Image (cartoon, rainbow, N blue to C red):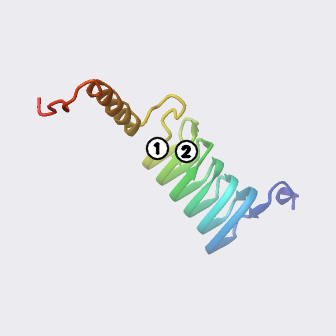
């Protein structure tokens, strides 16, 4: 047997199945078996025969196997050609290799640095309108 598990804080080998798990892993987890449950991990690696089902959250992930239900990442999601993800997927950045499959609700943050959310635009419009009305004694008729 190789020392594959020495490179990971958590490792699930082929033929191993965990159900009802609730895991919090501060480093890297590699899954070559099956996990059903809640997993919070810094970096997730799902091997070619690995299956992870449930509520998965973390910074980054590399998927060669199957992920189902909810995957929420703040950083990069890499889906290899054998990777399959189905469910609600949220990521910071995305890399897919030809052959990868993603099915479900897929979202990311839309350029947070330059994107101005609608409430801020509304606030600016209200400030502009207020500045126009500040010179008038009576409020402007807004029914026009």
**Which quarter of the rendered picture does the N terminus lie within?**
bottom right
The answer to the question of whether label 2 and label 1 lie on touching residues, with beta carbons closer than 8 A, is yes
Circle 2 residues within 10 Å: few <14, some 14–19, many ≥20: many
Tell me if residue 142 comes above or below residue 108 in the rendering: above
Spatial distance from mark 2 to mark 1, Cα to Cα? 7 Å
Residue that carries the numbered disc 1 in the rendered image = 107
Residue 77 x, y percent position in the rendering:
60, 43
The image position of residue 106, as x and y in percent, is 45, 46
Which residue is tagged 2? 91
Indicate the quadrant where residue 12 lies: bottom right
Instruction: Tell me the residue at 23%/26% (across/down).
Output: 136
Q: Is residue 10 left or right of residue 49?
A: right
Residue 78 lies, in percent from the top left, at 62, 42
Mark 2 element type: strand
Q: Is residue 115 left or right of residue 20?
A: left
Q: How many marks?
A: 2
Q: Which one is earlier in the sequence, the residue at label 2 or at label 1?
A: 2
Q: Dot 1: few (<14), some (14–19), or many (≥20) neighbours within 10 Å?
A: few
Q: Residue at x 63, y 43 (%)?
A: 75
Q: Quadrant of the C terminus?
A: top left
Q: Quadrant of residue 53?
A: bottom right
């Amino acid at each position: 047997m190789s020392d594959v598990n020495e490179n990971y804080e958590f490792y699930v080998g082929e033929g191993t199945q965990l159900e009802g798990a609730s895991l919090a892993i501060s480093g890297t987890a590699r899954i070559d078996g099956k996990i059903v449950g809640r997993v919070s991990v810094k970096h997730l690696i799902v091997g070619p025969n690995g299956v992870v089902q449930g509520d998965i959250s973390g910074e980054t992930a590399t998927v060669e196997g199957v992920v189902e239900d909810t995957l929420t990442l703040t950083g990069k999601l890499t889906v290899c050609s054998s990777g399959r993800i189905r469910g609600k997927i949220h990521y910071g950045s995305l890399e897919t290799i030809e052959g990868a499959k993603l099915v479900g609700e897929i979202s990311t943050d839309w350029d947070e640095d330059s994107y101005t959310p609608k409430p801020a635009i509304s606030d600016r419009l209200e400030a502009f309108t207020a500045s126009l009305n500040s010179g008038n004694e009576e409020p402007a008729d807004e029914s026009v």
